[in-house]
Amino acid sequence: MASSMDPAAWASPAFRWLLAGRTVTSLGSAIAPVALALAVLHLGGSATELGLVVAAYALVEVLTTLVSGVIGDRFSRTLLMRGSAWLAGLAQAFVAVALVMQWASVPLLAVMGGVNGALAALAGPSSRAVVAQTVPAEALPNAISALRLSQNTAMVAGFSLAGVLVGFFGPGVAIAVDAGTFAVAALCFTAMKVQPQAMPSSESLLNDLGAGAREVFRHTWLWVLIGQALVYHLVYGGVQGVVGPIVLTREFGDQAWGLSLAALMAGFMVGGVISLRFRPRRLLFSGTAFLALTACFPLAMALNVPLPAILLGAFVHGVGLEIFSVNWDLAIQQQIPPDKLARVYSFDQVGSYVMRPLGLALTGPLAQSIGEHRWLLATASVMAGSTALALIPPSVRNLRRL
């Protein structure tokens, strides 16, 4: 069993710069949504307008991600990462000035949300695909675990810091801090020197995109688990965004939902620590089995159990999802050719999030028609059942760690 502090990963300057850049970006990315929501409300925006601002970010991000995967395989990934970081920093600085100077508006925030969604998508696949260029192959498992653990820790700190910044200084200053984190990340990515990846020979963007799609469908385990992610986010997005907050605050008070999210993040962090040491040979079989634990959170909310049991369900959900995510990321890094890696990651990201807006739209009417607790129970059943179905293909059960 490898040490949790694999020297082959930590000895790489490129990996250390990547770790620093992605960590500080995660810190800012946790601050921004809290500050943005309060900024919209401070401007007199309604819940519907807030939803439109958030949707603008999500929609543009999904639409841009597939193109960014092609770009990430055609051009320097570090160049894309630092370029998008600088531009995102400038965009957030503009929003911060508009808020501080009090000439911002809800439509302006929606437009800038779309801009930031595009910039986030531009860097997303490249920042995941570049990991294998920063460390030796034997250090890749530890590198992935360390990156996810540091990012989750930074997000916990960011959520906490966001409330302090907005409460004492206002949303404009909080957005300015987010702009500063992008600038720091851009400096880290500038200092990160990696070997250039092999460039695909292609004739058009559509041909490159088609080659990425064919690579996805060439691996049964890959498209099966992307399909499972579609189902997962279709049903769970509404639990986290709509039904969960309503049920817990009504039954246990205003603090209950915040406590459950804290338990969820604690589960992510514990799962990351476990993944530094836990090296299953059949990585997708083990990871997918742990993914079934995510049904525990909606199941606990569906049952008449005390709040500590629900918090335990949220914690177990986080542990299971994080262990799956580490093994999933490692499977992609080890099995996909380097020149198609960013495109495959772009399909993975789109598959993970394209159904979430639909789930958010459908959850409210469905939960009202059949009852919130019944809907939570149905969600838990779908999450567990889809995970069990994903284990049927032999390629999911038998894929081996290299």
Image (cartoon, grey):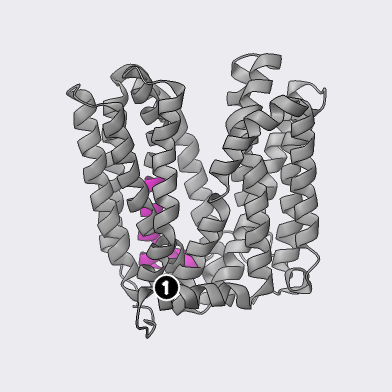
Residue picked out by circle 1: 133
Name the residue at 72% across, 41% down. Answer: 316
Amino acid carrying label 1: it is Gln
Image location (x, y in percent) of residue 308? 74, 25
Q: Is residue 235 above or below residue 339?
A: above
Which quadrant would residue 161 be assigned to in this image? Answer: top left
Q: Is residue 306 above or below residue 115?
A: above
Q: Which residues are magenta?
A: 9-26
Residue lying furthest bottom in this view? 201
Q: Is residue 15 magenta?
A: yes
Which quadrant would residue 362 be assigned to in this image? Answer: top right
- Identify which residue, 360 or 346, lies in the foreground: 360
Quarter of the picture containing the N terminus is bottom right
Name the residue at 37% across, 83% down. Answer: 202
Q: Is residue 5 visible?
A: no
- Identify which residue, 109 or 271, lies in the foreground: 109
- Identify which residue, 310 or 382, lies in the foreground: 382
**In screen coordinates, is 31 left or right of 341?**
left
Image location (x, y in percent) of residue 169? 29, 20
Image location (x, y in percent) of residue 257? 61, 24
**In screen coordinates, is 398 left or right of 139?**
right
Image location (x, y in percent) of residue 262? 59, 31
